[in-house]
Image (cartoon, helix red, strand yellow):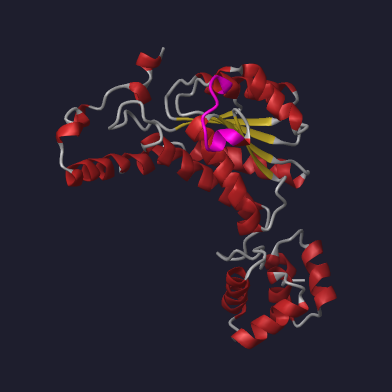
Amino acid sequence: MLDKLRTEKRNENSMDLDERSTYDVLKLMNSEDHYVPSAIKQQLNHISKLVEQTIERMKKGGRLIYLGAGTSGRLGVLDAAECPPTFGVDTTLVIGLIAGGEKAFIHAVEGAEDSPSLGEADLKSISLNANDTVIGIAASGRTPYVIGGLQYANSVGSLTGSLACNVNAPISTEATHPIEVNTGSEILTGSTRLKAGTAQKLVLNMISTATMIGLGKVYKNLMVDLQPTNEKLALRSQRIIMEATDTDAMTASKKLEEANGSVKVAIIMILTGKSEPEAKESLEKANGFVKYAIQK
């Protein structure tokens, strides 16, 4: 079956790859990478529908769960790991599961991706429920671990999405919202950490960022749920408050302290003149959206 996959075919533009100069190799890679955004553009409608329904599930207490093996699994784990520091969410809200467990992030675990039951078991281990969203990621679109996980997710009523880099992928038939980014053959035959991996990273960026925007984690284009857990992030939090309110550094720092480190509450205090308890209450009534809290 592998010989039928576009991601496994030889790229006609790179038949002489080992004879090229370093510059020419890099030039070819850069040229091939340009196909990725246009391939993703063809899938924006599918991505949008998946994100919109994911937001609705998460508003009901659901989680966003990525499921993959190898490079695909690592990219899912990476995107999930970036959500807590960027959006101030709990580490259990966005979860990355990789075939073979955490150790597989660094070292390949032989045979793990070939087990459909392992995908099901990993989802059972986090008590998957009907409010959750499971997105299966596989460049080939045929990974048994992902297929087994999606089948189990469907059986419990979870929202399911898939992300493949081949058309008519088997995982697409297991997902309510299939995404197929046709990135074509790699310059290094079968090395899907290249264009396919880039496409997956870009799509996962879209899914997590757009979802968090829909949950009120962003005000204008600012990361207002950022947690000031170190000096760099404290300074960034101060700068965000300054940008959002057009105030000076001293005022921003003072209000951030009064707001007990909450960037959102500090912004509301400055823009509305409310006290910390009043600003916090307004934010809660606005379901975490600063844009609505400052109108109340």
Q: Main secondary structure of the magenta part?
A: loop
Image-based side of 209 in relation to 227, left or right:
left
> Where's residue 52, x and y in %?
62, 43
> Where's residue 271, x and y in %?
69, 79
Residue 293 seen in the current view: yes
Dividing the picture into quarters, in which one does residue 67 lie? top right
- From the viewer's perspective, is residue 215 above or below residue 144? below
Query: Which one is in front, 255 or 124?
Result: 124
> Where's residue 140, x and y in %?
45, 24
Task: Give the quadrant of the C terminus.
Answer: bottom right
In the rendered structure, does residue 222 fall within the stretch colored magenta? no
Dividing the picture into quarters, in which one does residue 135 lie? top right
In percent of the image, x 75 and y 30: which residue is there?
A: 125
Query: Which one is in front, 289 or 64?
Result: 64
Q: Residue furthest top?
A: 1
Residue 173 seen in the current view: no
In percent of the image, x 64 and y 30: which residue is there?
A: 160
In the rendered structure, does residue 111 fall within the stretch colored magenta? yes
Segment tinted magenta in the rendering: 103-112
In percent of the image, x 76 and y 75: which residue is there?
A: 259
> Where's residue 133, x and y in %?
67, 35
Dividing the picture into quarters, in which one does residue 243 lie? bottom right
So how many labels did they put on this image? 0
Query: Which one is in front, 49 or 255?
Result: 255
In percent of the image, x 67 and y 66: which residue is there?
A: 229
Image-based side of 258 in relation to 179, left or right:
right
Image-based side of 75 in relation to 274, left or right:
left
Task: Give the quadrant of the N terminus.
Answer: top left
Image-based side of 195 in relation to 13, left or right:
right
- From the viewer's perspective, is residue 210 above or below residue 235? above
